[in-house]
Image: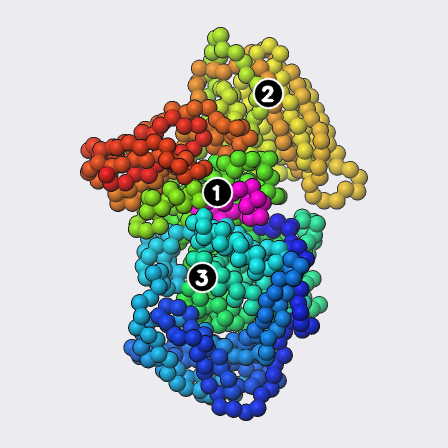
């Protein structure tokens, strides 16, 4: 997604007038490859090539000049590695802004990741234009037979195709956040962030290459003329990531590069006019979709991929290549045609598979809540991505996504973005960060590749969200989650059955409260609810949408209907804060209209949603009655508050219990349980929840023996209770203590 927050200062203050390093013509000298440090096993090795002048050619265009090194291992295996053009910079921090000054001339560099010890033979081949390649340098690189790092190798698919691992076979389970861009301090900001991530147990950060940050080829004058300042900054981020044990997931472009007329974020994301591939900027594309079909544009893009592979591919801290952020935000009726974009993804992923000698994974991403099977069914796409916003019951939902994607696509899924809202941080909606906490735990234990990666990173840190990672890390470390085999327990989590109404309880007072509605407009809901008690009202979002859809939605038209036993002086009040089109709202009691609120769109109003401040309130006669809110007009209105008064609890009881997400290994397990009163967004703004009796949970097909069960507070990581359990007939029964919000158990052999 896009937050609308650009870095302060918008862009880098340069101490040089030219963003691209000048190509210097040097006197003829023999070509030679010079090591910039010892070559060590499974650690990036870097070399400078001297004696090869560009001679007026564009060093970023391999059609004009290309250098490749063929390296042959002691075992006799040969592989080709592209060289890249490099410009060094000096970095300073002045008045809170990062400044870069170019140092020396540009030069050719080679980066390589040694996988074997011993003497490696190399030859560097030069190709100018259409001429045949010529060998310009040969030699030997000796890789010391020293032990590799504790963890080594590039990231690859795990054997179970649910998780990731590194070449050494160790699992890589992800814990992290989006850090797509920061403030004017540039890479200095990342020094602080990465250190905080390391101290709180995080190991992955997602980045964007965008017009305002890390812009290699995202400005009008950069088509096959990449910005060397941005490339140097990305180098620095990889160096900082290595120092802090963090993997980077670079997203190579975002959807706004193809947007023309989107009103959201004040039009800030309409950057087709800035796209270097736009014909108006000297590119080959008359319209945005041409980028995905035009042969010249596709050829130019592979040149960028070649450069990225050459410069960053040797770094094991590269998690994967992510082509796009939420590219389907621009699908028809906007600028792009899905079949063309899908075909482009397959072609470019195939290109990477053929030309990335380091073998990195490939992925892309779609908009919040979107699942387009065509993308994830491509065999060339290694990892599926899912972005989650406004979704109810995030622990249950993300655990379900993990199971569903694994079953349908047979590949890992990363929850690449998460937020309780896509429109902003919206701390009032989740003041205690319970939605965020449930998302982190649900994804980590639900069978995705790791935790969800939250959006709104700056606001999250300001709200103290880093402590949630520290707590999660403390518990998962005790469980050994980062090592060994783990798999989800039981069937995929499902929503509870709808409550039934029952009969009113005598001598029990009526209650008042708010129906918490579902703000995720993408999910079809039943639209009907039996209000059997306060919990049914708190969990109304399981059945009722905040969006009242009118006639323009055809068979997707949606109303709100709820039934209850009402006391004397009962009432319902709906408050509306957003609308689109001309909704015409009516409240019905038992099918009879009792109130109406037409909301005509103002004359000349722009297309799109508009803020409103209107309400409908009705009194309800005593007895059993059904209340409906219907939209007879076009498009929609959104309810931000639905208050009820005078509802009588019934003998149906509290209709659902705690929700548990469990992950197990051969002889250990982690169980995360959420109170039914706190399944987000229920109870989100309450200081705490009612005490919930612990409900026994059975781990089936469990090995014989005695086991230690320790219960922790997932908000702090502190231990709450410890007990022992013994397997009986292949079943280990875990009995939690009473709790109020959520609780996590670690089961280990005693």
* Quadrant position of residue 742: top left
Q: Residue drawn at (57%, 59%), measured in percent from left and top? A: 188
In this picture, residue 507 sits left or right of residue 284: left
In x, y percent, where is residue 191? 53, 57
Against 135, residue 494 (above or below) is: above
In x, y percent, where is residue 377? 44, 55
In this rendered view, identify the residue nearer to me: 57 or 259.
Answer: 57
| Front: mark 1 or 2 | 1
**From mark 3 to mark 1, how far is it between C-alphas?**
23 Å
Other-residue count near label 3 (Cα within 10 Å), few / some / many at <14 / 14–19 / ≥20 = some
SS under mark 1: helix
**From mark 1 to mark 2, how far is it between C-alphas?**
37 Å
Image quarter hosting the C terminus: top left
* Circle number at residue 644: 2
SS under mark 2: strand
Other-residue count near label 2 (Cα within 10 Å), few / some / many at <14 / 14–19 / ≥20 = many
User: Residue tagged by mark 1?
Assistant: 467
Over which residues does the magenta segment extend?
Answer: 451-469
SS under mark 3: helix
In x, y percent, where is residue 737? 35, 27
Q: Residue furthest right?
A: 603
């Amino acid at each position: 997604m896009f937050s609308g927050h650009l870095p302060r200062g918008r862009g880098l203050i340069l101490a040089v007038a030219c963003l691209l390093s000048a190509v210097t013509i040097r006197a003829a000298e023999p070509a030679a490859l010079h090591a910039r440090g010892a070559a060590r096993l499974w650690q990036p090795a870097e070399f400078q090539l001297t004696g090869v002048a560009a001679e007026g050619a564009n060093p970023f265009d391999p059609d004009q000049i290309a250098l490749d090194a063929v390296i042959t291992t002691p075992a006799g295996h040969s592989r080709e590695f592209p060289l890249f053009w490099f410009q060094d910079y000096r970095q300073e921090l002045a008045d809170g802004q990062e400044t870069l000054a170019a140092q020396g001339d540009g030069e050719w560099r080679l980066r390589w990741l040694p996988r074997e010890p011993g003497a490696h033979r190399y030859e560097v081949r030069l190709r100018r234009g259409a001429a045949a390649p010529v060998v310009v340098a040969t030699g030997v690189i000796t890789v010391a037979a020293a032990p590799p790092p504790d963890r080594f190798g590039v990231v690859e698919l795990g054997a179970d195709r649910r998780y990731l691992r590194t070449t050494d076979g160790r699992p890589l389970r992800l814990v992290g956040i989006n850090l797509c861009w920061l403030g004017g301090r540039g890479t200095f900001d990342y020094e602080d962030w990465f250190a905080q991530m390391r101290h709180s147990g995080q190991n992955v950060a997602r980045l964007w290459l965008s017009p305002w940050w890390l812009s290699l080829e995202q400005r009008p004058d950069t088509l096959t003329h990449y910005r060397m300042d941005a490339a140097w900054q990305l180098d620095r981020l990889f160096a900082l990531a290595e120092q802090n044990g963090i993997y980077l997931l670079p997203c190579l472009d975002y959807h706004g590069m193809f947007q023309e007329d989107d009103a959201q974020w004040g039009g800030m994301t309409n950057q087709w006019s800035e796209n270097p591939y736009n014909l108006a900027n000297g590119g080959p594309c008359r319209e945005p979709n041409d980028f995905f079909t035009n042969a010249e544009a596709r050829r130019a893009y592979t040149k960028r991929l070649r450069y990225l592979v050459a410069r960053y591919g040797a770094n094991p801290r590269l998690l994967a290549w992510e082509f796009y952020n939420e590219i389907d935000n621009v699908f028809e009726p906007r600028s792009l045609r899905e079949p063309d974009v899908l075909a482009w993804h397959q072609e470019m992923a195939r290109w990477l598979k053929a030309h990335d000698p380091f073998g990195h994974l490939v992925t892309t991403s779609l908009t919040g809540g979107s699942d387009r099977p065509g993308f994830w069914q491509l065999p060339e796409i290694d990892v599926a991505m899912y972005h989650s916003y406004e979704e109810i019951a995030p622990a249950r939902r993300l655990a379900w996504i993990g199971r569903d994607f694994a079953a349908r696509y047979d590949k890992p899924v990363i929850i690449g973005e998460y937020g309780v809202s896509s429109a902003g941080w919206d701390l009032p909606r989740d003041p205690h960060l319970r939605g965020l906490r449930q998302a982190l735990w649900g994804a980590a234990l639900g069978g995705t590749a790791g935790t969800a990666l939250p959006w709104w990173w700056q606001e999250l840190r300001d709200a103290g969200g880093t402590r949630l990672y520290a707590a999660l890390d403390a518990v998962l470390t005790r469980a050994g989650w980062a090592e060994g085999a783990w798999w989800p327990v039981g069937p995929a989590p499902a929503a509870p059955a709808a409550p039934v109404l029952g009969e009113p309880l005598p001598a029990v007072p009526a209650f008042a409260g708010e129906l918490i509605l579902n703000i995720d407009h993408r999910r079809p809901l039943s639209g009907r609810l039996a209000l059997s008690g306060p919990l049914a009202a708190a969990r109304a979002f399981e059945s009722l949408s905040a969006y009242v859809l009118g006639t323009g939605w055809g068979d997707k038209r949606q109303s709100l209907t709820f039934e209850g036993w009402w006391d004397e002086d009962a009432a319902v009040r709906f408050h509306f804060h957003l609308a689109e089109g001309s909704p015409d709202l009516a409240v019905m009691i038992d099918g009879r209209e009792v109130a109406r609120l037409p909301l005509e769109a103002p004359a000349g109003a722009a297309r799109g949603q508009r803020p409103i401040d209107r309400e409908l309130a009705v009194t309800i006669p005593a007895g059993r009655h059904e209340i409906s809110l219907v939209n007879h007009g076009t498009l929609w209105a959104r309810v931000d508050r639905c208050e009820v008064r005078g509802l009588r609890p019934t003998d149906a009881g509290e209709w659902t219990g705690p929700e548990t997400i469990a992950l197990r290994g051969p002889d250990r397990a982690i169980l995360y349980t959420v109170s039914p009163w706190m399944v987000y967004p229920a109870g989100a703004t309450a200081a705490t929840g009612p005490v919930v009796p612990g409900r026994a949970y059975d781990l089936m097909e469990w090995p014989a023996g005695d086991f230690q069960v320790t219960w922790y507070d997932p908000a702090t990581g502190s231990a709450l209770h410890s007990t022992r359990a013994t397997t009986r007939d292949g079943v280990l029964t875990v009995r939690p203590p009473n709790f109020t919000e959520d609780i996590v158990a670690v089961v280990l052999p005693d």
